[in-house]
Amino acid sequence: MTAATPSRTSSAPRRAPAAPGRPRLDWRIRFAALSAVWGFSFLLIKVGTEAYAPFQVTLGRLFFGTAVLAVAMSVRRERMPRSLRTWGHLTVAAFLLNALPFSLFAYSELTIPSTLAGICNATSPLWGMVLSVVALSEDRPTRRRVAGLGIGFLGVLTVLGAWQGFSGLDVGGTAMALLASLSYPVGWIYVRRTLAGSSHSNLSLMGAQLLLATVQLAVVTPLFTAMPTSFPVVPLLAVVALGALGTGFALLVQYGLVHEVGPTTAQMVTYFIPVIATAAGVLVLGEQLSWNTPVGALIVLAGAALTQSRARPRTAAIAPGPTTEGAAAEPGFAGAPVTAATTPVATPVATPVATPAGDASVRPPDAPSAARAPAPQP
């Protein structure tokens, strides 16, 4: 990974860095595709668990997702990490960001609708803010973000129908979905603390992490499930699509977006996932929808948006000094590099930020902290 480095001060005008090759598809099209794929993931989980045990669905998802990344690594001639320390940290990250939340969502959808699971997934930014304040000393809360936290959890209570005593709600399934959404920011903070400064590429870390998660499920699944006696086609295709599209392909698209348009824009997919998940559950699966579910979901999204907002920098208070140019970081999967914004002071070294699938991606200096990490992968 190439860190952003200070440029030499000179009276001569600076040349703009050479423009990288543009991706074939406009980023808005890829953004819409990513939103649809992740929004439909909850529907695919529900269909898959109709014929297969939750652990089997998760194992299949991880297997096919790893296969997609293995092909991408082969094409790009990427190598797996060699450091035992890195493999050790990735093992923990694989559990917190893949094996555990994927399994919890699969088990939760045995008893709750896919629409509710999708809305629970949108609470990750709320948990992330709480945890980052506790675990990350540099991440201080603002009044706006604290207000967003309160609004977000008010939305959760609205979705759950707290004034009705949570009647008609499966407490166990809902708790598992919320625990899955909590697992993501825990993993993000762990990755940020342990894999900062890693010299391995994003694709290499992602491939290794998904491989480790697949191994974890391969060990656990035979202990708690029996081999399927039949393989119904539709649920099987749902599992294949969940892994190949919702995990492998989606990760490649997401990192392309992060490197092309930045993490702030890329993370906006968070606000489309529950909307698409709800529409898919109602229109395709015929799930029932009471008024408090969409209303509560909108309140959750509003609160999440506030927790991820940041105050505008006061440029007038910055004293003049040597300028820096953001050097290109790890090339994105769509071919565009990450560049640090030009600032009046030396640009800090790029650090990793955890993402939905737990990859420690290059984090430019102006990227979100763990509390404002990219959208959690459903």
Image (tube, helix red, strand yellow):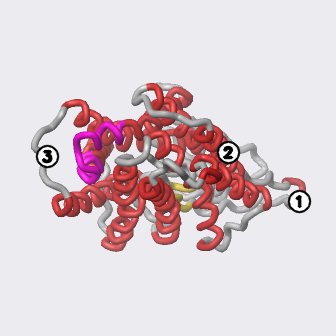
Q: Is residue 156 left or right of residue 223?
A: right
| Residue 290 seen | yes
Residue at (84% x, 53% y) in the render: 315
- Could you tell me if the residues under marks 3 and 2 are in contact, i.e. CB atoms within 8 Å? no
Q: Is residue 271 left or right of residue 11?
A: left
Residue 324 vertical position relative to residue 268 in the rendered view, above or below: below
- Mark 3 or mark 2: whose residue is earlier in sequence: 3
- Could you tell me if the residues under marks 3 and 1 are in contact, i.e. CB atoms within 8 Å? no
Q: Is residue 361 left or right of residue 208?
A: right
Residue at (66% x, 59% y) in the render: 6
Q: Which mark is residue 317?
A: 1
Q: Amino acid at mark 2?
A: Ile
Q: Which mark is residue 235?
A: none
Magenta includes 51? Answer: yes
| Residue 21 seen | no
Q: Which residue is mark 2?
A: 299
Q: Position of residue 46 (x, y in %)?
A: 35, 40
- Dot 2 crowding, Cα within 10 Å, few <14, some 14–19, many 20+: many
Q: Position of residue 261 (x, y in %)?
A: 59, 39
Q: Position of residue 63 (x, y in %)?
A: 25, 48
Residue at (79% x, 54% y) in the render: 311
Residue 95 vertical position relative to residue 26 in the rendered view, above or below: below
- Observer-nearest of 226 and 261: 226
Give the CA separation, mark 3 to mark 1.
65 Å
User: Which element type, helix, strand or loop, lies under badge 1?
Assistant: helix
- The magenta region covers 44-60
- Could you tell me if the residues under marks 2 and 1 are in contact, i.e. CB atoms within 8 Å? no
Front: mark 3 or 1: 3
Q: Which residue is mark 3?
A: 228
